[in-house]
Amino acid sequence: MRSQIHSLRRNAIRCFGSLLIASLITPTVFGAGTTVRFAGDSSGTGGAFIKKLCDQWAQKTGNKVEIISRPQDASATLQQYQQYWAAKSADVDAYQIDVIWQGIVAPHAVDLKKYYKDDEVKAYFPRIIENNTVKGKLVSIPWFTDAGVLYYRTDLLEKYGYKEPPKTWEELDEMAKKIQEGERNSGKRDFQGFVFQGKASESVTCNAIEWVYSYGGGVIIEPDKKVTINNPNAIKALQTAKSWVGTISPAGVVTYGEEEARNVWQAGNAAFMRNWPYAYALGQDPKSAVAGKFDVTVLPKGGDNGKNAACLGGWNLMVSTYSKAQDVAADLVRYLDSSDAQKQRAVELSLLPTLPALYADSDVLAKNPWFKNMLEVLKNAIARPSTVTGADYNQISTAFFQSVNKVLSGGQSAQDAVKEVEKVGKRLVR
């Protein structure tokens, strides 16, 4: 009996010692000293800003942040992330995720409603919260946002007698032709009326959804899973865009992404450009040929009875369900996404906040007076059908951008294009 008691005592001491050693080498997930691994931008100006915010949070909390770099290409980033998720890896605690990945990442994300009060969630743009909510689960919190906008040369509009930017695509076509003809006649042979993103990629998906929606043609697949792309308004939208290629837009626009369009614009060789807000600060650089000569506004409607459309873009923050430090990771996310941090980012990087209140902030507007034009755009931004299609979004987007590019290039009719996309959509949601 005594030997059994001694044996039990030895086992208890041995077990306690093991637990003590484990506690010394394994950081607690609640107290100071926890290392949070965050997968996000790590290069360039954006990466430097993120590191600064992470360092601020670390100093404040006594924790540490290890930033895990991601590829610049969004598709490559998703592939990298999916490897972590497939392995249910705890190597990453929080992620920077694209606005179109919500359906894909939902099974791997913590429901952030656990960490945000209802009033805090309501402070964000409702359209983005709606996009980021999958089956009642708040997959990610909006970090900074994006929406397609129209850039226009204020000096050239004045030169050719226009008092305001175009309200419809038809007006843009007319104005672009007049300005393009005048500029070319004055010796600028390479001048273009309108540049946009026509490349067979996610870039033209965003542009084409804006065209289709602006003419009342829907968003390919509606939130109720109804496939609506095969309709007369969508066909008209694509036919209208096709008419620009080789007239007010260069034939090569079918190979343009964001940067190709921006390069033409920033060199002073276009009257109008569709792009994302990031191009504003670059265009106003003193070395830019268009600095002080342009402004931004909402994208045109499709005819007098159409709607303004701006494709929703941007990045969000999520906490991994496989993280061993979810509470601490969520605290980092809250800090990175706070009103103060968003204000810093808006002032320093001109990135659009996801909190509408900041669009009335005097410091933000002093640095970015054009933000005043963005509030209405973002309130009406349209989401791509990524939440409704989930992990299959890439299939519908690929079918759409390939067909749209063929239409723009003259290799397919708009009628055949929408039929092909409809077939893919119906297969995905049946």
Image: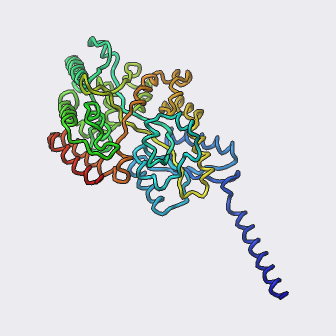
Q: Across the whole image, how many numbered discs are drawn on residues? A: 0
**Residue 42 at x, y = what percent?**
51, 46
In the image, residue 249 lies at what x, y percent?
23, 30
Residue 100 relative to residue 420: left or right: right
Image x and y of residue 367, in percent:
52, 23
User: Does residue 57 lie above or below 357 as drawn?
Assistant: below
Residue at 32% from the left image edge and 40% from the top image edge: 203
Q: Which residue is at 48% across, 43% downward?
A: 316
Left or right? Give the position of 102 relative to 120: left
Instruction: Using the image as rendered, state which of residue 394 and residue 129 is in the foreground.
Output: 129
Does the rendering let one see residue 269?
Answer: no
Q: Is residue 33 left or right of residue 300?
A: right
**In terms of image quadrants, where is residue 246?**
top left
The one nearer the camera, 130 or 363, is 130
Q: Is residue 348 visible?
A: yes
Question: Residue 276: horizontal and vertical position, in percent?
Answer: 38, 33
Quadrant that contains the C terminus: bottom left
